[in-house]
Amino acid sequence: MRFNEHGPIGVYFDEITLGTVWHTRGRTITEADVVNFAALTGDYNPMHTNAHYAEHSAFGKRVAHGMLSLSYAVGQMYQLGVLEQTIIAFRGLEAKFSLPVLIGDTLQVKGTVTDLKPMSRIGGGNVTVAFEIINQDGKVVQKGTWEFLMANKPTEPSAS
């Protein structure tokens, strides 16, 4: 990881190789996270916000919003510094929600680079990352792919 006077500088497209794996640190889902996410999005589904209702559901207790977990995973990846000042755009995602995430679960992300497509016209390339969101028991709760548009490393000015 490189740093400048403003902090970390991420990884450039032309520095990424197929098969590169990134692991994030863990993040515990709290009651406040679920309440705040419901308020932010307007998603007050009783599976997330009503303990009595959820008690009689298939899961037996409230579950965190799937999009909350997915949003945190993107943030966890960003916190690694990999994308810092080198990401041009988040281009897309595909996700499968496999297991419930409960209040108190701790999640971490494993991201593996599965495809690289140079896009010289924009000065970088498309990076496809297969991600897994893994709970404290080592179980994959969500998985899928992200696509990032990443910048190439700037060229050094030639000495004349």
Image (spheres, helix red, strand yellow):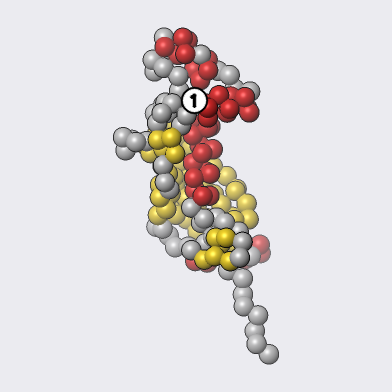
Q: From what the image shows, is residue 104 above or below residue 82? A: above
- Residue 23 as seen in the image, left or right of residue 44: left
Q: Quadrant of the C terminus?
A: bottom right
Labels in figure, total: 1
Q: From what the image shows, is residue 39 above or below residue 136? A: above
The residue under label 1 is 31
Residue drawn at 61 percent across, 75 percent down: 155
Q: Is residue 119 visible?
A: no
Residue drawn at 49 percent across, 45 percent down: 76
Q: Secondary structure at mark 1?
A: helix
Q: From what the image shows, is residue 121 above or below residue 132? A: below
**Residue extending furthest toward the bottom:** 160
Residue drawn at 55 percent across, 24 percent down: 35
Q: Position of residue 84 (x, y in %)?
A: 57, 56
Q: Amino acid at mark 1?
A: Glu
Residue drawn at 51 percent across, 13 percent down: 50
Q: Is residue 149 visible?
A: yes
Q: Position of residue 135 (x, y in %)?
A: 37, 35
Q: From what the image shows, is residue 60 above or below residue 67? A: above
**Residue extending furthest toward the left:** 137
